[in-house]
Amino acid sequence: MPIPVSVIVCAHDEEQNLRELVPQLLAQDYPDFEVIVVNDRSNDATFDFLREASRFNPKLKVVQVEYLPPHANGKKYAITLAMKTASNEVVLLTDADCRPNSPAWIASMANRFTPDTQLVLGYSPYIKQPGFLNLFIRFETLFTALQYVGLALAGMPYMGVGRNLAYRKSLFLENKGFRGYLDVTGGDDDLFVNRHATSKNTQVSLGADALVMSIPKQTWREFLRQKTRHLRVGRFYKFGHRTVLGLFSLSQMVAWITGIYLLCTNPLILWVLTPLLVRSALFMITVYRFSVRVRHKFEAWTIPLLDFLFTIYYLSTGTVALVSKKAQWKN
């Protein structure tokens, strides 16, 4: 018997995206589900569209947020209201600027639940578009997924992405939602997983049907602002997770910085170049094979260059995350 599912979408001024997304969600090939859209203080025609759409489809529920309580976080408050509205035990989250890759998306995520499963992590790549920014965004997303999916499969789940994430409503309510990090901007997805995911209660859903495609940022400013917010949230991860991720990033930076320094100062260039090339080749193979596994192939020939550029990316965004002011989620 398929497990009933409540799909949750939080939206602020997302009329155009919802006009595309909502019909795709309602057309999912799954026997028992509902779609809950939280209209978070929108200034456009979001509510008008949702009100009209809900008249013709009983599966669509609309939650209207007119006022944000003092000290409340917009996204977390919206999700909390959706949880209270949800009729089903399993909730599946995505964003307004996302699109299911298949009519079997709900089924692909729901089928991973067993009696012991509390969370299911999905993958949400960005839509391929022309330009280097898009290439970089897609690589960063793939690389992040390689880390959180790989560690989850190894028994150390530490994060998920709210664009494609499922968990039990009871897990949310029993742990009082986002209590403990309500004042942290962001973290409605990765911090929730970080606090409650274990090797025994977490599953991963991979494959073409399980993908949710996301619309990428169009400017470096938007992208870096988003990633800075995510890195800032990472400071609240469990110590063990921060240590593992920190060591991985450090090893990546040390490999490139040391390699470049030795290439510039060592006359025996072959002795330096060989291990650097071997490392780059192994990294390229690993990332590409993962992209094949998640059914979203990446341009293999670009991976070594992007790997190098990530050294600069880590240093710059990490520094900004430490010194920048708190960002907001459309508050």
Image: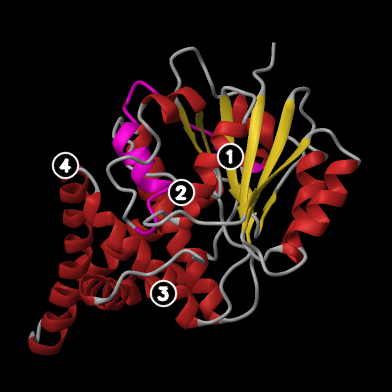
Q: Nearer the viewer, residue 88 or 265?
A: 88
Crowd band around label 1 with a 10 angstrom C-alpha radius: few (<14), some (14–19), many (20+): many
- For the residues carrying marks 4 and 2, which lies nearer the camera in this image? 2
Describe the element under mark 2 as helix, strand or loop: helix
- Residue that badge 3 annotates: 225
Residue 132: give its label: none
Which stretch appears magenta? 185-208
Pointers 3 and 4 in contact (C-beta within 8 Å): no
Q: Which of 257 and 174 is in front in this view?
A: 174
Q: Where is residue 200 in the image (x, y as percent from the top left)?
A: 35, 21
Pointers 3 and 2 in contact (C-beta within 8 Å): no
Pointers 2 and 1 in contact (C-beta within 8 Å): no
Please name the residue shown 34% across and 77% down the image: 309
- Residue that badge 2 annotates: 76
Q: Nearer the viewer, residue 227 or 102?
A: 227
Q: Where is residue 40 in the image (x, y as percent from the top left)?
A: 60, 56
Callout count: 4
Residue 180 sits above or below residue 142 on the image:
above
Please name the residue shown 53% across and 72% down the image: 135
- For the residues carrying marks 4 and 1, which lies nearer the camera in this image? 1
Is 120 left, or right, of 210 in this rendering? left
Q: Where is residue 322 in the image (x, y as percent from the top left)?
A: 21, 71
Describe the element under mark 3 as helix, strand or loop: helix
- Specify the amino acid type for callout 4: Gly
Residue 82: give its label: 1
- Specify the amino acid type for callout 2: Lys
The stretch drawn in magenta includes residue 150: no
